Amino acid sequence: MRPDFLIIGAARSGTTALTHFFRQHPELFVCEPKEPHFMAFAGRQLSFCGPGDDSLMNQLAVTDPEAYPKLFASAGERQVAGEGSVSTLYYHELAIPNIRCHAPDAKLIAILRDPAERAFSSFMYMTSLGMEPCTDFRSALDDEERRIRDNWHHIWHYVRMGRYAEQLGAFQRAFSPEQIRFYLLDDLQQNPKPVLQDLFRFLEVDDGFEPETKREINRSGKPRNQLLQRSMQLLRRSALIKRLVKTVVPAATREKIRAANLEHPEIPRDIRAELIGRFRDDIAAVEDVTKRRLPQWYT
């Protein structure tokens, strides 16, 4: 079975929230794992070298062309099925040919976020998992090019993942406007109902369905309790233990435990100003595809 839709990115921009809302809709099915990363890495043997990559990304990504369709086998006969790998948007040069080969008719959904805030959220998320080796955002930014050269996987590419202009341009050139939609995290957070109604219409399912949207999903932050954090880190670094925990502790409970242990600092103003300067062309690209002015992203 081929997926009917792909949430292609961007990372730390609301894809997990969309997945949560979609899974509530009786006419939609999102596979487990939510991010098989197949379109970016189909047929490849992954060998990323960042912290935890060997036991997580390299082991958990579904790259086998025979295994990928099986992820959707349990979808109901009339359910619209899909997945949400953020690597699809980022590795567009790899993903686009694979989409054309394995899911040429899939509807594509991109949700985008202020790239400076996206970068900081990604840093704080990796910090919350106990996997970010740098203790401050500036040091992590300074280390980014080395990490890329050393083949750390995309979650560590804090600035480069926010380079939307090239990514969006590639998808716009490759697919018709009828096949792809662009949304903003700002809108999903501030007024989710019309965003979800539009998405449901795009996917041709009942747009009158209203999922529960009040609970925050997958929020990043700084750990309050380091002992609890280290325990969660050990669980994440063992793929086997992680799978066992998933069978015993519901996802909502795991998320509540993680979120309760987090503080939520803001991006340092001087670093935000610097990043805005670096991202101006990418913000303009988002304005172009969404036909929206985004003055708050420039300040």
Image (cartoon, helix red, strand yellow):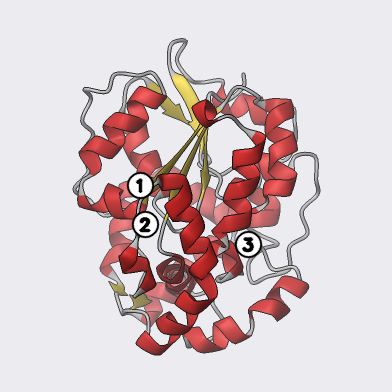
Instruction: Identify the image quadrant of residue 67.
Output: top right
- Which mark, residue 270? none
Query: Which residue in the protein does label 3 denote?
Result: 154
Q: Position of residue 257 (x, y in %)?
A: 30, 62
Cα gap from disc 3 to disc 1, whole angstroms: 20 Å
The residue shown at (44%, 67%) is 232
Q: Which x, y percent locates residue 7? A: 50, 39
Q: Residues within 10 Å of mark 2 (few under 14, many from 20)?
A: some
Sequence-earlier tag: 1 or 2 = 1
Residue 245 at x, y percent in the picture? 45, 51
Residue 142 in percent (x, y) is at 61, 86
> What residue is drawn where x is 74% and y is 45%?
94
Crowd band around label 3 with a 10 angstrom C-alpha radius: few (<14), some (14–19), many (20+): some
- Asked whether the beta carbons under mark 1 and mark 2 sit within 8 Å of each other, the answer is yes
Q: Is residue 43 visible?
A: yes
In this rendering, the answer to whether 57 lies above or below 272 is above
Q: Looking at the image, is 266 positioned above or below residue 259?
A: below
Q: Earlier in the sequence, mark 3 or mark 1?
A: 1
Choose between 23 and 12: the one closer to the eye: 12
Indicate whether 196 appears above or below 272: above
Q: Dot 1: few (<14), some (14–19), or many (≥20) neighbours within 10 Å?
A: many
Residue visible at 30% across and 64% down in the picture: 259
SS state under label 1: helix
Q: Any mark on residue 218, and which?
A: 2
Alpha carbon distance from label 2 to label 3: 18 Å
Which quarter of the image is occupied by the C terminus?
A: bottom left
Residues at marks 2 and 3 touching, judged by CB atoms closer than 8 Å: no
Q: Earlier in the sequence, mark 2 or mark 3?
A: 3
Q: Which mark is residue 17?
A: 1
Q: Amino acid at mark 2?
A: Asn
> Tag 3's secondary structure?
helix
